[in-house]
Image: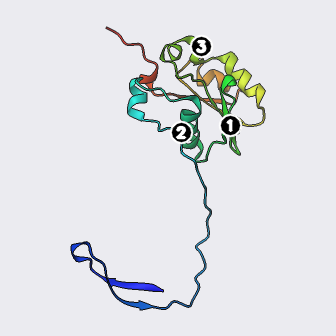
Amino acid sequence: MIAQRKGAPDGELIVTGEKAVTERAEGLGGEFTYCTLGDPVELDKVLSGESLPPYPAIGAALFHMASNQSLNPKAIRQKEFYLGETESQHVWLIYKPDLDWLKTPDAALTLARAKAFAEAKPGKRHLVFAPARFVSQKMLTEQNIPVEFVPLPFALYRIERS
């Protein structure tokens, strides 16, 4: 049954008739994805360094932005900075929710780290999110290392100058 209605004066719904529906319509196709939401990643607070999200939370947001896919939490290897993979690439995140650590050279993509990532998961391109890098994209390309650097927002790791 489908209720036919007219207006809603003073917040009241007035039903003026009903129509019996006997036909069944096929769906439009597509698929459904069920997601469980974690703690919010508040970009304003992240950018100011006021509230740095845990690795899985920021990793899930970055993975989705880069691939338009959901991150499988079981794929995350936080100690190795590995987030997961898509059909065409592996995704890495050099990050710890520690503002002081994010300002150190340990938080940067280096030539040695890029080589290690590529060797650890061969056969695909590698997308690496990090606060900084100490190797140029040109050098990575020249050495045939399939790694692409993506910077984390600058305010996360900048050193305040007085």
In the image, is residue 134 above or below residue 120?
A: above
Give x and y (percent) for residue 137: 60, 25
Say which of 82 and 127 sits in front. 82
Q: Amino acid at mark 1?
A: Gly
State the SS at label 2: helix
Q: CA distance from mark 1 to mark 3?
A: 21 Å
The x and y percentages for residue 90 are 69, 36
The quadrant of the rendering that contains the C terminus is top left
Q: Disc 1, disc 2: CB below 8 Å?
A: no
Is residue 53 in sight in this rendering? yes
SS for tag 1? strand
- Would you say the residues marked 1 and 3 are in contact, meaning their CB atoms lie under 8 Å apart? no
Residue 56 location (% of width, % of height): 59, 33
Q: Amino acid at mark 3?
A: Asp
Q: Disc 1 and disc 2: Cα gap in Å? A: 12 Å
Q: Which residue of the protein is positioned furthest toward the left in this rendering? A: 10
Looking at this view, is 113 or 60 the one in front?
Answer: 60
* Disc on the earlier residue, 1 or 2: 2
Residue 23 is left or right of residue 142, and the answer is left
* Residue at 78% in and 36% down: 123
Whether 42 is drawn above or below 18: the answer is above
Q: Earlier in the sequence, mark 2 or mark 3?
A: 2
Circle on res. 84: 1
Which residue lies under the disc numbered 2? 61
Q: Secondary structure at mark 3?
A: helix
The CA distance from mark 2 to mark 3 is: 22 Å
* Mark 2 or mark 3, whichever is nearer to me: 2
Left or right: 139, with 121 as reference point: left
Q: Residues within 10 Å of mark 3 (few under 14, many from 20)?
A: few
Disc 2 marks a residue whose amino acid type is Ala
Residue drawn at x 47%, y 36% as measured from the top left: 41
Residue that label 3 marks: 106
